[in-house]
Amino acid sequence: MDVRTRFAPSPTGYIHVGNIRTALFAWLLAKHNNGSFILRIEDTDKNREVEGSIEHVIRCLKGLGLYYDEGPDKAGEYGPYRQSERLEVYRQWAERLIQSGRAYSDPYSKDELDEFRKQANANHQPFLYRNHRPENPPVWEYGKTPLRFKSEPKDYQWHDEVMGNLSAGKEAVDDFILIKSDGYPTYNFAHIVDDYEMKISHILRGQEFIASTPNYLNLYEALGIEQPILATPPPVLGPSGNKKLSKRDGAKDVLDYLKEGYLESTLVNFIATLGWNDGTTKELYSIEELIKSFSLDRIQKSGARFDERRLLWMNGNYIRELPIEELDKRASNYFPVEAKAYPEEYLTKVLSLVQERLKYLAEIPSLTIFFFVDLPVDPTLISNNKKLADIGNEKLKELLEEVNETLKDSDFSIGDLTNRLNNLLSVTGQPPAILFSLVRIATTQAPSSPPLAESMALIGKERTLSRLSQQIKSL
Ligand code: GLU
């Protein structure tokens, strides 16, 4: 089978993690099968369109490396790939349905329809347009009146590759609008035509479309076309795990994650494993591994929880694995401005010291600033550290003076610093949690830092000793 999948966003705003996951699953399925992945822009609702969203979608996909084989800016055999450029195609298909007696012009005004709806409510009946089918519908005027599908209601059972066997009664089938009065098709009509014309083999989309699936099945039959395979992953849930993920849960735009220095390989791994696994407990997958092991039948039936801490953990993992030259390249835009005054090699050393603890690249300034500037003494670092605060300033001062004395004679090589610091533990009788924390604070003005001796060696003798003296003065 020639596997062709598509991502079909409507340009109605920023693209969240749930949408991009659908795109990723479709992309993985295509790549797994050496098939094609198509980007189709569903811009048939001019009122809901948000400027810039098409460019945004494209940047997100490319930013994650989800390149499409055909799309609005990538010519293919079945274009155009923007629905607003395909109006003539839908019109021809609509004419065919009129000719076969399966579509008719909707003669009712909005008020009349509202009245039908009210009646149905009053009778505690679901409103079905087909109960009000006009006997002699007027001739359809394209661009003036809506065109409706003339359904043939029946019960349906169908298979969904993710959700299994689904069914619905005939009340789920109605005469829906095919072409609106503005001449644009509805999603319900356009996607069926396009999936067929673009030879789409699998439809992956959100569960909001399950309720309408009986209508789609009815339309496939009316058009005499075969329905593609359906796969409908459940939504991504917010951190609480009981409702759909929303912006309010802190889920950011994909581009924001990229801007903050989450690696594309992390994002792809994270998003793919939101509700999918390969049957083992493996969590870290390269993109190649994902392509190799992806299959629809391992997409979970229940919603997957979006857990940003897992994303951080994963990104930290990927950053740790990067060769230093690669990290160097990626980090270059993230250093604080003060780093400009330092040579390349110094920046590389700083990076290799923080690589172990870096979770995303936008953290670089806060984790490295003390390598570039002498920060003023921050007294809260001591007062917030219970162990140090309990000792009292006099004693802390004495300890630091001792440290200062010993380090004066050091050559500030990592080895010598390590020896001297360890020696100080026995000489002063203080545990590392006190002595090293104190020295760390004095040297970095940060509550935590990379290994102490390494950091001091890089900061250098003169600067380190002057920082120690400054702290002593302040105590
Ligand atoms: N345009 C639809 C949406 O953005 C796409 C649904 C589909 O993938 O068929 O929700």
Image (spheres, rainbow, N blue to C red):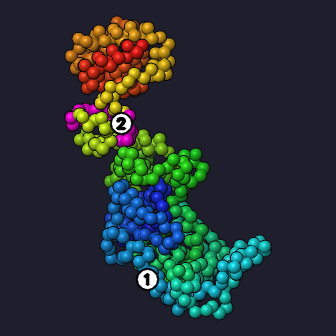
Residue 134 image offset from top left, x and y in percent = 67, 88
- The residue drawn where x is 35% and y is 17% is 470
The residue positioned 26% from the left and 37% from the top of the image is 340
From this view, report whether residue 356 is shown above or below residue 163.
above
Mark 1 nearby-residue class (10 Å; few <14, some 14–19, many ≥20): some
Q: Are marks 2 and 1 in contact (CB under 8 Å)?
A: no
Relative placement, left or right, of 470 versus 187 is: left
Instruction: Tell me the SS state at disc 2.
Output: helix
Q: Residue 89: which disc?
A: 1
- Residue 351: say if magenta: yes
The answer to whether any part of residue 153 appears in the image is yes
The span picked out in magenta is 343-366
Query: Where is mark 2, residue-wise?
Result: 365
Mark 1 element type: helix
Residue 78 horizontal side relative to residue 103, left or right? left
Q: Position of residue 211 (x, y in %)?
A: 60, 68
| Amino acid type, callout 1 | Val
> How far is disc 2 from disc 1 in space, using C-alphas?
54 Å
Q: Nearer the viewer, mark 2 or mark 1?
A: 2
> Across the whole image, how many numbered discs are drawn on residues?
2
| Residue 73 located left or right of residue 346 | right
The amino acid on which the numbered mark 2 sits, given as a three-letter code, is Pro
